[in-house]
Image: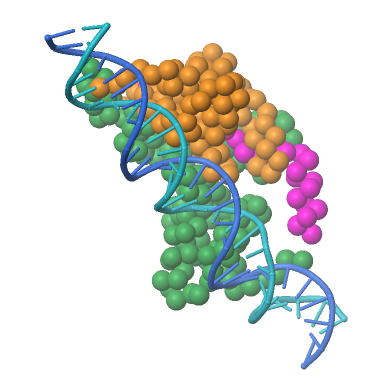
Chain colours: A green, B orange, C cyan, D blue
Amino acid sequence: MKRNTWQREAVREALDGTDGFISAQALHSSLHASGSPIGLATVYRALGDLATTGEADSLQSPDGEALYRACSTTGHHHHLICRNCGRTVEIEADEVEAWAQRVAAEHGFTRAAHVVDVFGLCADCTVLLAAEAR
Amino acid sequence: MKRNTWQREAVREALDGTDGFISAQALHSSLHASGSPIGLATVYRALGDLATTGEADSLQSPDGEALYRACSTTGHHHHLICRNCGRTVEIEADEVEAWAQRVAAEHGFTRAAHVVDVFGLCADCTVLLAAEAR
DNA sequence: ACGCTTATTGATAATGATTGTCAAAACCAT
DNA sequence: ATGGTTTTGACAATCATTATCAATAAGCGT
């Protein structure tokens, strides 16, 4: 049976009060800074549960951290990432959302989330690398 | 100055000969299995370079591994991945291809590649997890 | 072909995020 | 309040990746 603990609530609230994605480590630090004695492992478990139940989205940052976000439909967007300098531009992908859901459903998948990110070289790095390659 | 070594060639070829995404570790194992004495660190470096120059795409798997794929337009497709059991279905995303190019261009990005992968729970795992959650 | 300079390699240590362990504490139906 | 069971948390363990650094080898000029 699933029990309700103040720790889980604390994680849920901290996540709700955060704008955008945050790592488990950062969320733990944030909670500690607020005086909560919650353990790191517990934060990981709580976030994992939230992601499993669909209350939170998770994605992997380019450097391998897992990032979490309260699952609100508002503010969903994707990224255009410079493969060289890491510069990131947020992009809208409305037309892709429906597509992802449809494809998932067609194959019997549920709780579909998607990773839609575009990598490229930003204008600056395009010039930069062209010079280096010489 | 950039030098050409048989190691870099080996990595490039191994990646070309692989369908879909593969992790650095797996690629290293594969090379070893083929009798190559190439070092693990070298595989990481080579893959990083390939990703930087745009010869390879990279994405983060849900469990935190970096996955690489030869950047070829042939056989280009995307994946529908079960977040629980890892089952993978290849999917077409023609309508998304053009979108990615357009968005990249709009922001001055060149050499645009994209990562479009949909994660969800496959039919089996949907049932499985529903049972567990009880 | 020869040597020189310097990028590259590779074995291994270091790092850092995440997960496993397990006794102690907390939850909740009774 | 009690008992059975889940959850917690400190810490160890794991695993991918990166840093280190001496040894090697690529490519240049000769």
> Residue B51 magenta-drawn?
no
State the residue at coordinates (58%, 71%): A7
- Residue B22 can be seen, yes or no: no
Q: Position of residue A97 (x, y in %)?
A: 56, 36
| Left or right for A105, reference B95 | right
- Residue A82 can be seen, yes or no: yes
> Residue B126 magenta-drawn?
yes
Q: Position of residue B14 (x, y in %)?
A: 53, 20
Q: Position of residue A12 (x, y in %)?
A: 56, 64
Q: Is residue B104 above or below residue A89?
A: above
State the residue at coordinates (48%, 22%): B11
| Quarter where residue D29 is shown | top left
State the residue at coordinates (72%, 31%): A107
| Left or right for A89, reference B59 | left
Q: Where are the magenta residues, as a range?
A: B111-134
| Quarter where residue B42 is shown | top left
User: Quadrant location of the C terminus of chain A?
Assistant: top left
Count all numbered tags in the image, as a single digit: 0
Q: Position of residue A78 (x, y in %)?
A: 46, 39
Q: Choose between B3 and A53: the one closer to the eye.
A: B3
State the residue at coordinates (80%, 53%): B131
Q: Is residue A37 above or below residue B121?
A: below
Q: Choose between A92 and A128: the one closer to the eye.
A: A128
